Image (spheres, rainbow, N blue to C red):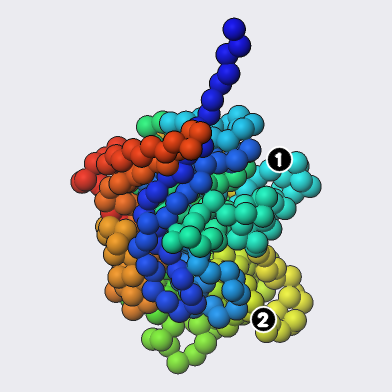
Amino acid sequence: MQIVKVTYIEVIRCRAAILWKPGAPFSIEEVEVAPPKAKEVRVKIVATGFCGTEMKMLKSKTLHHDRYPIIMGHEGAGIVESVGEGVSTVKTGDKVITLFLPQCGECASCLNSEDNFCKQLKQSETNLMSDGTSRFTCKGKLVYHFGNTSTFSEYTVINEISVAKADAFAPLEKVCLISCGFSTGFGAAINTAKVTPGSTCAVFGLGGVGMSAIMGCKAAGAARIIGVDINKDKFEKAKEVGATECINPQDYEKPIQEVLFEMTGDGVDFCFEVIGNPETVAAALASCHESHGVCVIVGLTIGDQLNISGHLFLSGRSLKGSIFGGWKSRKDVPKLVSDYMAKKFNLDPLITHTLNLDKINEAVEFMKTGKWQVAHTIFMSEYLGSRERVCGDRGRQWKESHSWRSHRQATEEGFRTL
């Protein structure tokens, strides 16, 4: 007797926030999420962030061109629902962190111990999976992916190289920050700038990533950490996470770089631009010590041109870029989660508000108007299903609906805002 193993092809129907065209609000729709193919993972998203990157994408008239409709979101955490053929690093039921920056482990960058810019990141530029197709459909239309992750959907399909296994006891509604914002800012100080003990630092932009950069400077032993922002409502939170003082450029008639030079005597040792504004990049660099100051660009500046005087570099200043804080994503993210579980750093100060998925457009408006003190948002679905599976079996279809809830239940569900 021959035993034949039959694997049903399953499609999950769930909710997602779709952007149908540039400038339009998000629309909560029912989408179909196809099963994972080889080397892919289907993940039930428990928590996801609304990062400043999304805000810049929403404002941009040039990015993504005609690739709509699209499901955005890249800062997430969830539970593996199913895996495709050949997946070996995670299994169904594992908690995972989604990674906009993959780690293939094979390219020159991955093999270089000082590099983390995996060449597979370029795959995200297609807004499709590796085989050139999408795993999302809505109302019969193909829906594009975003950032290798598309976490604004209750379920998503991601390449195996773009997920990192997390501690089984990790609270996903908090460690999802490690997926982007926290790691980017914290690592910019620790890995990219290599902040030294006793040094003086300045952080331009006190959103979620800026706050995380302050935390990194403090962890590295900086003696003085100056927060710079035009929103004074953020100063108390910045001091809570490690800033020694905060200043508002609008309070001064002179350029902010001159103010910082007067405050420090010789300029700051390390400066972080976490806004993504070409003008503030130039001001941040000019704020650095003339001979050894290091300025790190952390804010997204895709498509922007920098206008910086060459004179600033003559005496020894340096300007560096940073992606994901210099961390090798699949290798380092599990360690960061473990460090959080060991209370080596605290993510709680970064979390201030909670909203449900259907309030995503309110989150956008709050971020535009600056009504929330910190510029990130974390979303968690109030419930993670009605989930509907459609399975093919010789023309037979069956449907299964469930109400899925996060492990912390209703008290810790919804959108969270940093």
**Relative to residue 313, is residue 220 drawn left or right?**
left
CB of mark 2 within 8 Å of CB of mark 1? no
Amino acid tagged 1:
Gly
Q: Which residue sits at x=59%, y=7%? A: 1
Residue 185 in sight here: no
Q: Quadrant of residue 321?
A: bottom right
Helix, strand or loop under label 2: loop
Q: Quadrant of residue 175?
A: top left
Residue 210: x and y in percent read 46, 64
The numbered mark, 2 or 1, whose residue comes first in the sequence reads 1
The label shown at residue 305 is 2
Q: Which residue sits at x=40%, y=48%? A: 13
Mark 2 vs mark 1, CA separation in Å: 32 Å
**Relative to residue 106, is residue 344 drawn left or right?**
left
Q: Which residue sits at x=62%, y=48%? A: 102
Residue matched to label 1: 105
Helix, strand or loop under label 1: loop
Residue 242: x and y in percent read 40, 57
Q: Is 316 in front, or is 81?
A: 81
Mark 1 residue crowding within 10 angstroms, few (<14) / some (14–19) / many (20+): some
Amino acid tagged 2:
Gln
**Relative to residue 166, is residue 322 drawn left or right?**
right
Residue 11: x and y in percent read 46, 44
Q: Residue furthest right?
A: 108
The label shown at residue 395 is none
Residue 294: x and y in percent read 64, 65
Q: Relative to 160, say whether 322 is above or below.
A: below
